[in-house]
Each structure stands twice: as structure tokens, then as C-alpha cells.
Amino acid sequence: MGTATLPKKFELSGRKEPFRKVVCILMTDDNELARAQISERLSHIAMNLHDATDEEDTLDCIATHALTAVGGDDAGILLLASKQHVRTVAATSQAVHRADELQTELGEGPCLDATDGESDYLIRNTRYDQRWPRWSAAVVELEYSSVLGVSLHTNHRQYGALNLYGIDPEAFTADELATATIFARHASIALAGAQERDGLKFAMDSRHAIGLAQGLLMGRYDLNADRAFAVLRRYLKRPGFCAASF
């Protein structure tokens, strides 16, 4: 996994021509059948995302289902590890893993900029796009010509960005960008739910382990419950201590 420090402030100037999110339009034409088909496909995918077992499984499902929902040849996810660092957490191929890593290494790229939650980005042809010159040149060598970078966020939290790559130029248009934006919202809600479930499971497992350790202390040293918990609490403050070690 690649990790890098984010720029203190992204240069979201007109030079980068960010696409603002448009969630009320699925297609630019007036084809109601196409809209209905996209809506149905996104609904089924959203249900599958919520069936994922944990956060890691959810991230893998997001990357895989993004290709079904939007199109493209590969997908990856950059996740905010903190306010200043991002890391690659899911990728459908080694090439896209490297493409995402290059953004963190070079400190530039559409998907890296999308992690701030302010804009989504479309590159129609990496060979000629000059908004992220070093990264675009490197991605050409990986044979990716088209790129979408869309934010993963909810109303309460910014998670990172979903990145879609196409081998052919012009593989993505504003229609795919609009669809990717809607998919990213479903994905963000699923990710938030997965993290909450993982957090609750960790808390329950920790509580169970602490209860067992407390019982062992009571039996081994003839302590009452309060005294055993006080002893255990002192041990819990030590770095690297695990209640299960009792």
C-alpha cells in the first residue's frame, strides 16, 4: 500500500476545470429507458454493497462493482488514513494500484484532488491533459488513457476517492461522471456502515476479552470484581497490552 502526505491546500483553480457534482441527471439525453436501466442497476449494486461482510470486503466490492455501474477497465480506491495521509486500499489490478501510488508519490492527480470532497474530475486523454503533467505522463506508460476521480464522502465524513481507469481515450464522458458520482454516494454509505459494524464488533470482542481477563484475576488472586477491574485497567494502559494475554 502506498502512503503519502497530502498537500496542505489543493490548487482547485480554473486551470483544473473541476466537474461539480450533478446527481439529478443520469444521462445527458432524454432516454427514459436508459435512465431506468441505470437506476435499476445501481439499486441492485447498492444492495450488494450493503451485504459485504466487513470494511475490507466492502472496499473490494466497491472497486469491482464500480466497473459494472460506470464502465472502464480498472478501478481503485484511495482512502484517507488521516487528514494528511492517504493510502491505496483496493485495486482491480497491479497497474491501477501503481497508478494510484504514483499520485501519492508525486503529490498530484485527479483522484488525489478528489479526496478533498470538493470536486470530481474527468480526464478524456492522459496523453494531452496537462492539469497533472507528471502523473499523466507516468500513467500513459501504464497504458491508461481515460480517468475518472470521484469523491467518497457522506454528510458527516470524507473517506477518500474512487478512481476509474480506461485504456482507450474518451472512454468516459460527462454521463459516466454523473453515474459515477451517484454510485460513489451509495458506496460511501455502504463504507460508513461497514466501518460502524467493524467498530461495534471490535468493541464487543474487547469487552468479552476484558470480562474473561477480569474473571481470571478474580479466581486466581481472590479479588472482588472492582479490584480485579482496577488491576486490569492499569495493565490496559501499557503499550501493546492485550487482555486476551491473560
Image (tube, helix red, strand yellow):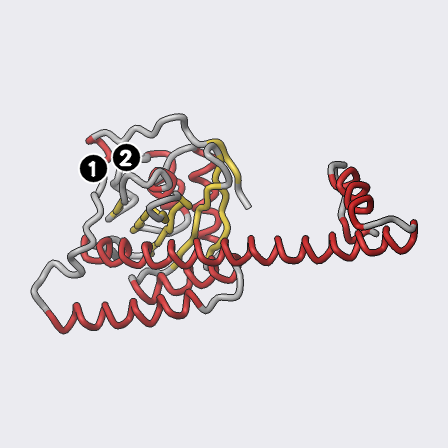
Q: Give the answer, above or below, for where 166 lies relative to 52.
A: above
Locate residue 83, reporting x and y percent.
46, 34
* Closer-to-camera residue (127/184): 184
Q: Residues within 10 Å of mark 2 (few under 14, many from 20)?
A: some
Residue at x-position 55% and y-position 46%? 1
Label annotation for residue 17? 1
Q: Amino acid at mark 1?
A: Glu
Locate residue 41, reporting x and y percent.
28, 71
The local secondary structure at tag 2 comes to loop
Q: Give the answer, above or below, for where 64 lies relative to 9.
A: below
Q: Amino acid at mark 2?
A: Arg
Occupied quadrant, residue 184: bottom left
* Closer-to-camera residue (230/56): 230
Locate residue 8, reporting x and y percent.
40, 26
Q: Which residue is mark 2?
A: 131
Position of 129 compared to 217: left or right? left
* Closer-to-camera residue (167/40): 40
Label 2 and label 1: CA atoms lie apart by 9 Å
Q: Residue furthest top?
A: 8
Q: Residue furthest left?
A: 30
- Looking at marks 2 and 1 on the same chain, the residue that comes earlier in the sequence is marked by 1
Residue at x-position 84% and y-position 52%? 246
The local secondary structure at tag 1 comes to loop
Query: In the rendered structure, are the residues bearing label 2 and label 1 in contact, judged by CB atoms less than 8 Å apart?
Result: yes
Position of 104 compared to 175: left or right? right
So how many labels did they put on this image? 2
